[in-house]
């Protein structure tokens, strides 16, 4: 089959790889209909992780069940399914309590497994024609049989639940004010989730015009950080007040305020601490890694990020971090889609054949206009 293979920094190719096969009785094989490129893939693409050549990318996967292992009971051949980016076993201490992003079984020695991702276990990604899904009864979310909402559902693998997770980590509630840093897919979905949860005003911070426009169209207040410190802009607008909640949907590759466009790994964390009112909460779905081979800063290279902890303490702020436990949210968000209450595909800006993945990666990585969220379409 054809698959998107990482060869080295800024070098991915569509290559022939072996078809996946049933390895355990609890596996299924899914024929992929939609698989998305994620901002998380870009960390690997840019050589900013320990990813090794040969890795098949792709953790946002949806398709139709093609083959079923003998121990699979619920999922049937022909079912249309969506897979959370996390792989969980369903029976470990963490999965049992709903922390499926930290499964203790699927990636021994580590808490958490995923498809096509560095350090996340031996699982090939789904930017390919077919995907092996372990513990399929646990890891397949059933979708309605028709072909409706294909791109809305595809957002359930990661960014819609991750945006929702950001809002949950910050405990966003009715009538609250929120600052969301980042208007990439995760930031936009975080803002969307805040609106679903009843936030009154949501500020969305970025510097890319078409992404800020999407936030504005959604009903949020766009803040361009290239025009001045975003926390100051928000407090000026609010006549000296900050916000109750903030969400970091950027992560460790945050761009600083300087004209050089250099990275400043702690700049968004600092922005969250600055703009959030005393007793507020900060949700951090944006990724921070324990080791970054491409970091220019010696601390960041070891996953250390200086933050104003004294200010955080003085304000009594709390923060929540980590990979999304997709299964906590995906059924409920699916049902909101089915009911016509939400339309997360509003962030999808491009649909391209799998063969065009190298170009799509390059353009998404450059944050080119029209490349906010790319869905790849394998031909099989
Ligand atoms: P993305 O790279 O498309 O978006 C990031 C956005 O942040 C860009 O639009 C960029 O212009 C903006 N940005 C950069 N510096 C900024 C700053 N200083 N202030 C405000 N905005 C700034 O990526 P994405 O797909 O939206 O993902 C965002 C982050 O979420 C990534 O770190 C990704 O790895 C992470 N992520 C985490 C999880 C999880 O489970 N926690 C899941 C998916 C993605
Ligand atoms: Zn993703």
Image: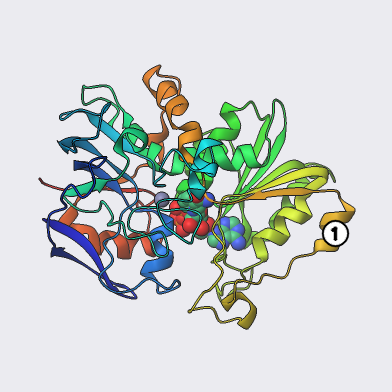
Query: Compared with residue 72, is residue 234 higher up or lower down, i.e. above or below?
Result: below
Give the residue at mark 1: 311
The residue located at (45%, 47%) in the rendering is: 185
Disc 1 element: helix
Residue shown at 71%/53% (left/top)? 272
- Is residue 365 shown above or below 115? below
Can you give x and y, in whole percent of width and height, for residue 207 in the image? 54, 57
Q: Is residue 107 visible?
A: yes
Q: Indicate the position of residue 188 as horizontal and vertical percent values.
A: 51, 43
Q: Quadrant of the C terminus?
A: top left
Q: Toward which corner of the image does residue 193 lie, by quadrant?
A: top right
Where on the picture, by quarter, is residue 137?
top left
Look at the picture and state if 142 lies above or below 84.
above
Quick one: 293 or 94, which is closer to the camera? 94
Count of labels in the image: 1
Q: Residue furthest top?
A: 339
Camera sees residue 212: no
Within-10-Å neighbours for mark 1: few <14, some 14–19, many 20+: some
Does residue 171 appear to the left or right of 81 in the view shown? right
Q: Nearer the viewer, residue 140 or 329?
A: 140
Asked whether 305 or 224 is in front, the reply is 305
Residue 46 point in image, percent of width and height: 40, 71
Image coords of residue 162 (percent x, y)? 50, 43
Mark 1 vs ligand 1: CB under 8 Å? no
Q: Is residue 56 left or right of residue 284?
A: left
- Residue at 18% from the left image edge and 53% from the top image edge: 354
Image coloring type: rainbow
* Quadrant occupied by the N terminus: bottom left
């Amino acid at each position: 089959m054809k698959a998107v293979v990482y060869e080295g920094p800024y070098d991915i190719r569509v290559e022939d790889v072996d078809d996946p096969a049933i390895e355990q009785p609890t596996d299924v094989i899914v024929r992929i209909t939609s698989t998305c490129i994620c901002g998380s893939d870009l960390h690997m693409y840019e050589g900013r992780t320990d990813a090794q050549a040969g890795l098949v990318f792709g953790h946002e996967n949806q398709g139709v069940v093609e083959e079923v292992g003998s121990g699979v009971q619920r999922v049937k051949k022909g079912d249309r399914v969506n897979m959370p980016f996390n792989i969980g076993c369903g029976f470990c201490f963490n999965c049992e309590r709903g922390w499926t992003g930290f499964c203790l079984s699927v990636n021994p020695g580590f808490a958490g497994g995923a498809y096509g991702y560095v350090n996340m276990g031996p699982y090939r990604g789904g930017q390919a024609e077919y995907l092996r899904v372990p513990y399929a009864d646990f890891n397949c979310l059933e979708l309605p049989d028709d072909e409706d909402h294909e791109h809305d559902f595809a957002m359930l693998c990661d960014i819609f639940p991750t945006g929702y997770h950001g809002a949950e980590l910050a405990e966003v509630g009715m009538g609250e004010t929120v600052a969301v840093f980042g208007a990439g897919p995760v930031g936009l979905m975080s803002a969307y989730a805040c609106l679903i949860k009843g936030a009154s005003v949501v500020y969305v911070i970025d510097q890319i015009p078409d992404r800020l426009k999407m936030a504005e169209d959604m009903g949020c207040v766009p803040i361009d950080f290239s025009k001045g410190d975003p926390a100051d802009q928000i407090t000026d607008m609010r006549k000296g007040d900050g916000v109750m909640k903030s969400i970091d949907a950027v992560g460790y590759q945050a761009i600083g305020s300087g004209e050089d466009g250099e990275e400043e790994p702690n700049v968004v964390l600092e922005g969250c601490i600055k703009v959030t009112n005393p007793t507020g909460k900060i949700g951090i779905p944006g990724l921070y890694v324990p080791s970054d081979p491409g970091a220019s800063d010696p601390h960041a290279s070891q996953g250390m990020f200086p933050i104003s902890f004294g200010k955080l303490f003085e304000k009594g702020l709390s923060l929540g971090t980590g990979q999304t436990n997709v299964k906590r949210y995906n059924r409920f968000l699916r049902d909101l889609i089915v009911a016509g209450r939400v339309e997360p595909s509003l962030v999808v800006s491009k649909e391209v054949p799998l063969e065009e993945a190298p170009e799509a990666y390059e353009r998404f990585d450059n944050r080119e206009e029209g490349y906010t969220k790319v869905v790849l379409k394998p031909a099989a």
